[in-house]
Image (spheres, rainbow, N blue to C red):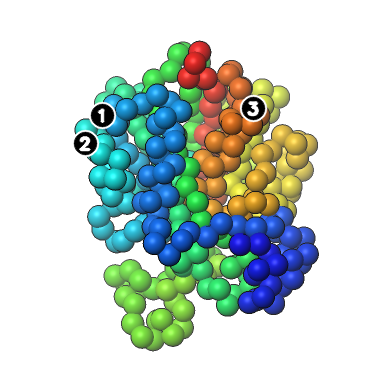
Amino acid sequence: MTNAMLSDTVTPEDDWIFSRTGIKERHIAADEQAPSDLGAAAARKAMEMAGVAAGDVDLVIVATGTGDMQFPATACIIQELLQLKNAAAFDISAGCTGFVYALSVGRQFIASGVYQTVLIIGTEVISRVVDWDDPETCILFGDGAGAVVLQPTAPGYGLLAAKLGADGSGGKHLLMPAGGTRLPNTPQTLAEKLNKLHMNGMEVFRFAVKTLPKVSLQALAEARLGLEDVSLIIPHQANRHIIETAARRMDLPIEKFLLNLERYGNMSAASVPVALCEAVESGRVKHGDVVVLTAFGAGLTWGSVVLRWQDPAQ
């Protein structure tokens, strides 16, 4: 869905949307598609790239805030879709930071020796929970999914460090008030659109530009690396101005950051894995490169992981 298509239903024009967000278009799931469908497709591609068979997968972790239903977990639905009969499965809800949280959790299962192959998926159909009459939010989001396979690596490769954080006092700035057990959906909540995403954009912006540089540097310090060692930073794709501001605060050129939100918008927990996949496929991430994945989202939550990329062929 392009900005021009959106302009037919909401006030902002194409140029206005792009100048304030850096977004030109976003993808919207078909009516019959759920997060499990998008996530399963991404998982199949990741498993194929990694040379992993269904029977090899020990654990499925799905990061999503827009799961198919309250329960069972979307991870369990994907486990069935892909016939991952040997795998445990659960979801993580950490908003747009969900994929980074899931990577950190999956890393622990690998490091402890409990599991050898962990499938991590970020998938969202966030178009179903945005208010399409609200130009402050509906212009930002798109649907999508991305996935990776975690396995033991050679020493010095793979996930080197992770730093996670949360501040529940900021939860009021980005939330979907109704639809849970505290405030179940009723005719009144539906009429008031409390079952839709609500966001205080300015507060989220302030939080993001402060947090993104800080948590990235903290994760690098834990890995005993500096910005000079980093080949690429892949941030959550929320808004171009957030990423540009973070780059200035880190005294880095914007070229050091991967940006693809122009074509996808904010895909919440799917943003980082989709961007990572594009970076690998385009050659921006090569064997031995140090990459920082960093995100922030509802909760409020934030997180960053540092990895040294190991090409599966190496």
Instruction: Decide which of 287, 42 is in the foreground and name it.
Output: 42
Using the image, tell me which numbered label, if any, was put on residue 199: none
Percent coordinates x, y for residue 83 in the rendering = 25, 39
Residue 7 visible within the image: yes
Q: Quadrant of residue 277?
A: top right
Percent coordinates x, y for residue 311 in the rendering = 52, 20
Q: Residues within 10 Å of mark 3 (few under 14, many from 20)?
A: few
Instruction: Decide which of 201, 4 is in the foreground and name it.
Output: 4
Q: Quadrant of residue 107?
A: top left
- In the picture of the structure, the residue carrying the numbered disc 2 is 85
Q: Residues within 10 Å of mark 1 (few under 14, many from 20)?
A: few
Q: Quadrant of the N terminus?
A: bottom right
Helix, strand or loop for disc 1: helix
Q: Tell me the amino acid under the disc marked 3.
A: Gly
- In the picture of the structure, the residue carrying the numbered disc 3 is 283
Q: Are marks 1 and 2 in contact (CB under 8 Å)?
A: yes
Q: Residue at x 32, y 72 (%)?
A: 182
Q: Residue at x 42, y 30 (%)?
A: 48
- Estimate the spatial distance between the alpha carbons at disc 1 and disc 2, rounded to whole Å: 7 Å
Q: Residue at x 46, y 67 (%)?
A: 129
Residue 209 visible within the image: no
- Estimate the spatial distance between the alpha carbons at disc 2 and disc 3, rounded to whole Å: 34 Å
- In the picture of the structure, the residue carrying the numbered disc 1 is 55
Percent coordinates x, y for residue 279 in the rendering = 61, 34
Q: Tell me the amino acid under the disc marked 2.
A: Lys
